[in-house]
Amino acid sequence: MTVRDLLKRTPFRLAVTFSLFFITTILALFTVVYLVASARLVADIRDRVETTLDSLAALDGERTFDDLVTLVASESESVRDPDFIVELVDKNGNFLAGNVRGVKDSNQWMTLKRADLFLTLDRGEPDDEFLAIWRPLLKGKLLVGSDNSEVKQMKSFLKKLLGYGLLAAFLAIALCATYFARETQHRIDAFARPLARVSKGEIAARVPTSGQQDDIDQVAMQVNGMLGNLQRLIENVNQSSSDIAHDLKKPLGRLRQRLDDARRQAATKEEFQGAIESALGDIDSISETFDALLRITQIEAGARKSRFVTVDLASLLADVRDVYDIVAEDSGDRLSYSSSCDGPAQVRGDPELLVQLFANLVENSIRHCPADTAISITLSAESGAYIVSVADTGPGIPEQERQNVFRRLYRLERARSTDGSGLGLSLVAAIVELHGAKIALSDNAPGLKAEVRFPAA
């Protein structure tokens, strides 16, 4: 793998970014500690110098100045500490006492190098430095300075500490970043391999999960859900293509036969016109089938989600009952509606499609059940969901066929003699999926119960 390929990998870039951020943070913290500690030590040295000045200046007076000269001379001769300098001069700048001579006059704090000073007793290193300041007296000036070697030592110690710390931190960060980058890359590769297989046509491939229920597992489950939907759509398309070819073969063959018979056998204008009208009826039936297929496809693609509003299921189901009550009565059936909800049952959805959903279920019961069948619509509520059941006391659907009836153009053997294209329940399933609901068919003992569970708005 080349460096360019390595730089393209997200885990590597994240590891490098994390390492740089961490090292930058360490450097920033060290800089703060370095500056604060340096300032603190310098302040301590100045405090010592100020204290010494105060104690010596206590003898500054008309009668005690000579005592101050004697004290400074005595201290300068007896001092064994190479970290301390003192100089006392008169008003004309003439040297009176001290262990250093000729220091330039200044009103500010000065940093003096030992190599630049004329010391009467020089026991230190040439590169030593002093922090010193002059203080005016009645008959002259007094200089006191202290060596700042402890500042240099502290800085040297902190620099070494920083070097070792950065080395240790770099090694630790490098190891951690490498480990996490490898682990992340393994997870990404685990995503990439199944997706590559899907792109080659293996639509059953799925992304593995680690079982940790972390964010990557959440994404993996969402990807697997998407792949599952994709597989189902592809299978539906393949099955629909086969079903369309199979189910439209008969009406197209019948249409061709009628037109051929009319061409060869129609002796009068009326016979020819009758054959044409029958052919037009077959064409209308085929057109309705294709319209229904297109409608299902549009719904499955989610094109109608933009029309979602808050819908009251209780009111909508009452309207469906009112519309189909007469239709059921004309067929010799009985249609009823009941609700156990105290108030409105609000869900998010397309009102037109929801009416189509329940209308199809009711029409299915009316069409495929004998006369005197009881058809009921019930609405109930559970925690966070509303349940709509459409049940009848008809012949029902065998358990092994209950999933098949949602396939496009699929019809039970006994239903092939009735009108219909086999798309009613396919449309129902598409509408249910669009609304994030669930549908289940069960035995009503006798008859069939279709139960649709909606998430509450």
Image (cartoon, rainbow, N blue to C red):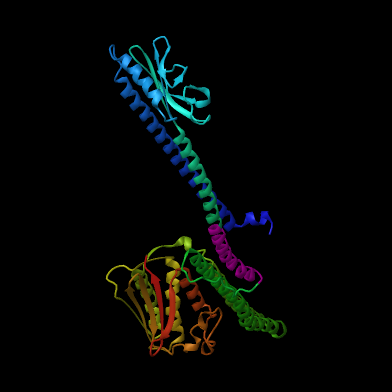
**Residue in the foreground of this view, choosing between 432 and 420:** 432
Task: Determine the image quadrant of residue 287.
Answer: bottom right
Is residue 94 something that shows in the picture? Answer: yes
Q: Residue at x 54, y 49 (%)?
A: 20
Camera-side residue: 86 or 229?
A: 86
Q: Is residue 174 magenta?
A: no
Query: Between residues 435 and 209, which one lies in front from this camera angle?
Result: 209
Can residue 280 be seen? no
Tell me the quarter of the image containing the N terminus: bottom right
Q: Is residue 184 magenta?
A: yes
User: To which quarter of the image does residue 107 belong?
Assistant: top left
What secondary structure prevails in the magenta region?
helix
Residue 110 to residue 353: above or below: above
Q: Residue 209's spot in the image, x, y percent?
A: 52, 71
Segment colored magenta? 175-200
Q: Extreme top residue here?
A: 92
